[in-house]
């Protein structure tokens, strides 16, 4: 059971980092380099703070169940 929660933490951290970087790049692109680079980290923290825990606690286990189901169906139909 420890491994199950460890996978969620890793995927949640990755999702948070990706959300932060994507929002930061959006701030720079939308507001220009000078206006988006320096204060852009502040609004970028908000989607990262939402995406990280959401993936960690809620979203990755249904994806894991769906992946296991699709793998079972693929292996069953391959024979």
Image: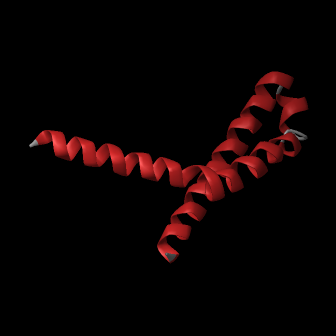
Quadrant for the C terminus, please. Answer: top left
- At x 80%, y 42%, the residue is 44
Q: How many marks?
A: 0
- State which quadrant residue 27 falls in: top right
Q: Is residue 77 above or below residue 56?
A: above
Where residue 72 appears, as percent x and y from the top left, is 27, 49
Which of 78/38 is in front?
A: 78
- At x 65%, y 58%, the residue is 57
Which of 49/25 is in front?
A: 49
- At x 74%, y 36%, the residue is 23
Where residue 42 appears, as percent x and y from the top left, is 88, 45
- At x 33%, y 43%, the residue is 70
Where residue 15 appears, as percent x and y from the top left, is 62, 49
In the figure, is residue 52 to the left or right of 7? right
Which of 33/65 is in front?
A: 65
**Model colouring:** secondary structure
Where residue 39 appears, as percent x and y from the top left, is 91, 40
Q: Is residue 30 above or below residue 63?
A: above
In the figure, is residue 1 to the left or right of 35? left
Which of 69/56 is in front?
A: 69
């Amino acid at each position: 059971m420890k491994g199950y929660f460890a996978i969620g933490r890793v995927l949640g951290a990755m999702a948070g980092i990706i959300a932060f970087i994507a929002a930061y790049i959006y701030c720079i692109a939308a507001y220009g380099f000078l206006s988006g680079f320096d204060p852009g980290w502040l609004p970028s923290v908000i989607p990262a703070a939402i995406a990280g825990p959401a993936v960690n606690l809620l979203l990755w286990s249904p994806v894991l169940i769906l992946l296991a189901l699709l793998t079972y169906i693929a292996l069953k139909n391959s024979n």
